Image (cartoon, coloured by chain):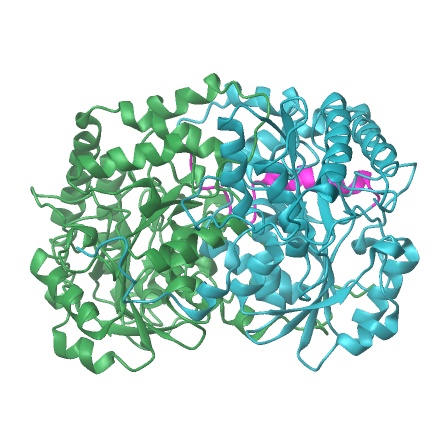
Chain colours: A cyan, B green
Amino acid sequence: MSSRTETTALRASARGGRVPASPIRRLMPLAEEAKKRGVRVHHLNIGQPDLETPEAMRGRLSRYSERVIAYSPSGGTPEYLGFLVEYYRRLGLRLTPDELIATTGGSEAILFAFLACADPGDEALVVEPFYTNYSAFAAMAGVTLVPLTSRVENGFHLPPREAWERAASPRTKIVLLCNPNNPTGTVYSPEELHAVAAFCRDRGIFLIADEVYREFVYDGRRTVSALALEGCEESVVLVDSLSKRYSSCGIRLGCLATRNRDVHRACLRMAQGRPSPPGLAQFVAVGALDLPPEYMSGVVAEYQRRRDVLDEGLRRIPGVFLPKPEGAFYFIARLPIADGDDFASWLLTDFQLDGATVMIAPARGFYATPGLGADQVRIAYVLKEADLRASVEILRSALETYAHRRGAGHARPTVPDGPDLFLPQGS
Amino acid sequence: MSSRTETTALRASARGGRVPASPIRRLMPLAEEAKKRGVRVHHLNIGQPDLETPEAMRGRLSRYSERVIAYSPSGGTPEYLGFLVEYYRRLGLRLTPDELIATTGGSEAILFAFLACADPGDEALVVEPFYTNYSAFAAMAGVTLVPLTSRVENGFHLPPREAWERAASPRTKIVLLCNPNNPTGTVYSPEELHAVAAFCRDRGIFLIADEVYREFVYDGRRTVSALALEGCEESVVLVDSLSKRYSSCGIRLGCLATRNRDVHRACLRMAQGRPSPPGLAQFVAVGALDLPPEYMSGVVAEYQRRRDVLDEGLRRIPGVFLPKPEGAFYFIARLPIADGDDFASWLLTDFQLDGATVMIAPARGFYATPGLGADQVRIAYVLKEADLRASVEILRSALETYAHRRGAGHARPTVPDGPDLFLPQGS
């Protein structure tokens, strides 16, 4: 039997090697060690909402009465598809069940969309910084992500059409757009969306729209769904998920919606191959139909208060720059540091304020262009307001200490790529 | 807005078009129509067990007490991984949690394995007839399935090494083996397994072993897991699922197990990308630890009785040939017909005995080599004995009538590729 320390003789595929590790993976053991030392770690790095999954959904579990937990139809149960149709109807979007496919989270919808819209070697344009897991799906699908840079100074709003034209090539088959945006917290205006959609239509490429944070918009903003854009019916593939909206990441349920029959057919065949989405999740999901409108407005108000705590607190810290977050529950801030990876490590290994520190996600991992984002970090606000206030004070004090510490060239500890200790940082 | 009848202007990817439709898809509307005419349809076509999901698992649902249904670790919860370690330990297989990855059914494990073991354009050897969904995963992964034919006359046992050598090319990276076998019901002997494993080791290719029917072996047989084969630690990637074992297809939970560190790392990163397996499923699954050994032996005895009903009944019908099924809950039989697709359609459209008919899966869809399997059908036995006895009589009478009917050139009705009416036929 081969020893664990031996080099593997039989190597994984090239694409297997290209699936990236999580950019915060390296930090997880440092957080664990800090906790072992008795330091409280405020997790500003994760995308797992702390709000309760609504009782209207959870409560259904005790009423599950099927004696055989059987396959559900590949495209989704009639009940779940009916729920989706009604959910979108309330948003003003007319969709029929045969334009929808139930998926195992938004993740499977993204993978299906990549596979159905592009062939190996094709390219997808994506605005950086972007959700890091897109890189995993792209590697799995053999699609090259071509980044268009959005800038903190500009609130991470979309680059002009010329930039899109420059970035495109004959192999460009996809624009992948996350709106409201993880990790930046930017909400694109209808005009921005129309411009991107027109670009896609003119070039005959697909617009994969990741709208899992649809409701998470602040200050009275409204989002426009890509599916509502006129003249783009053929090109839009919507990716959606219940994870964030109903604080139910663990059920793994989402959907893909498209009016492009050819793409729908290809995705449905993939769905038939696997051959069924999670059944218990679909059973739980339909409980969301019973939620009053106040449920979502309450959730959004809660996140807006949290955003305000961080936004107001952080922008008072000298050297910190952040655009006012418009949506989702993340944002990217520029800090007065040279190396976000070093700072994030140092927070866990060398710093504490009253027995507590924070874990943040260095932003470099959200950029495809090397060198970008070194002085930026992503901050999520899925913690209670009191913890967020404490986190602001920790960051204020930490930045001061960090600026004055000896040995600014402080080497980052190396941590091996160990077993799966970490909880997903979320979408 | 484009009309539904218009041709799609923006086409799906080439690989999207290569994902095959289910071979029984065409028959589903015919079965629906038969039911509308009041004909009872015995479904010998599906792989959805009719046995109850054990109360030890289902009963846990009402005890789920988490207030947030949160992401679980990407590789699986400690509890589920612990369950898997214990399950394999009882089989005599020593596995550690870091050799395992929880997957969304066996299906995701197959997809991960394909992606991690081969690059687009690479080849996988597979013994035909084979589980049709392998074609979907292969198309998604851009891997070409190269069939080695096994023959009904030979009980669908494995071809000799020369055949494997002839089928292999420099692009061969994978042998994909399902044991006990769906669709044939064959259980490979230790000698057969050793021969395949040696072939893989000698050529430096991976052996992806699909063992989701592991316990389903009859007449006192025992299966050998590919993971137990000495000297093959680097090459074996095990694909497993709880769906059949615990009659729980709908929870969508399985695992991938490998001692190849490079493949494990690649698959774990894919797992991190999606970023979590279904949480409720893992919560339910661990209940299986409390099942007494009599649970599985009872299930196997039940299926063996069912097999006996079909085996004894069908082999008395003139012109029917079938090897005695050794495992799983399917087999392939050769019937005295020229075209299994036509016969299967005709059973639904033109035949009934005492108000009932049967739905069977034409075997042609399980072969990659054109023309093979035309006179064969796959029969699953996930129905009660009484229904199986009735099914035998229906088939006996139907074959007699079919042989004497006028217009043997009877055209098959064409049925459009409609919406997702059908329940998965199972793995």
In the image, residue B297 lies at what x, y percent?
Answer: 16, 32
- Relative vertical location of residue A356 with respect to residue A103 in this rendering, above or below: above
Q: Residue furthest front?
A: A406
The structure residue drawn at horizontal position 55% and vertical position 63%, both measured from the top left corner, is: B417
> Residue A352 occupies which quadrant of the picture?
top right
- Residue drawn at point x = 51 percent, y = 67 percent: B414
In this view, A109 is above or below B9: above
Quadrant location of the N terminus of chain A in the rendered image: bottom left
**Residue for point 80% across, 26% down:** A302
* Snapshot quadrant of residue B348: bottom left
Question: A33 or B234, which is in the foreground?
Answer: A33
Place of residue B34 in the rendered image (x, y in percent of width and height, measured from the top left): 45, 49
Q: Is residue A104 above or below residue A15?
A: above
The magenta segment: A68-92
Q: Which residue is depicted at the point 15% across and 38% down?
A: B305
Residue B246 visible in rendering: no
Q: Is residue A223 left or right of residue A72?
A: right
Q: In the image, is B140 to the left or to the right of A321? A: left
Q: Is residue B240 magenta?
A: no
Task: Decide which of B308, B351 is in the foreground and name it.
Answer: B308
In this orientation, which residue lies closer to the viewer: A356 or A165? A356
Q: Quadrant of the C terminus of chain A?
A: top right
| Frontmost residue, B323 versus A366 | A366
Tag count: 0
Q: Quadrant of residue B318?
A: bottom left
- Does residue A200 appear left or right of residue B122 in this picture? right
Q: Is residue A23 visible?
A: yes
Residue A76 lies in magenta, yes or no? Answer: yes
| Residue A97 % position (x, y) | 66, 48
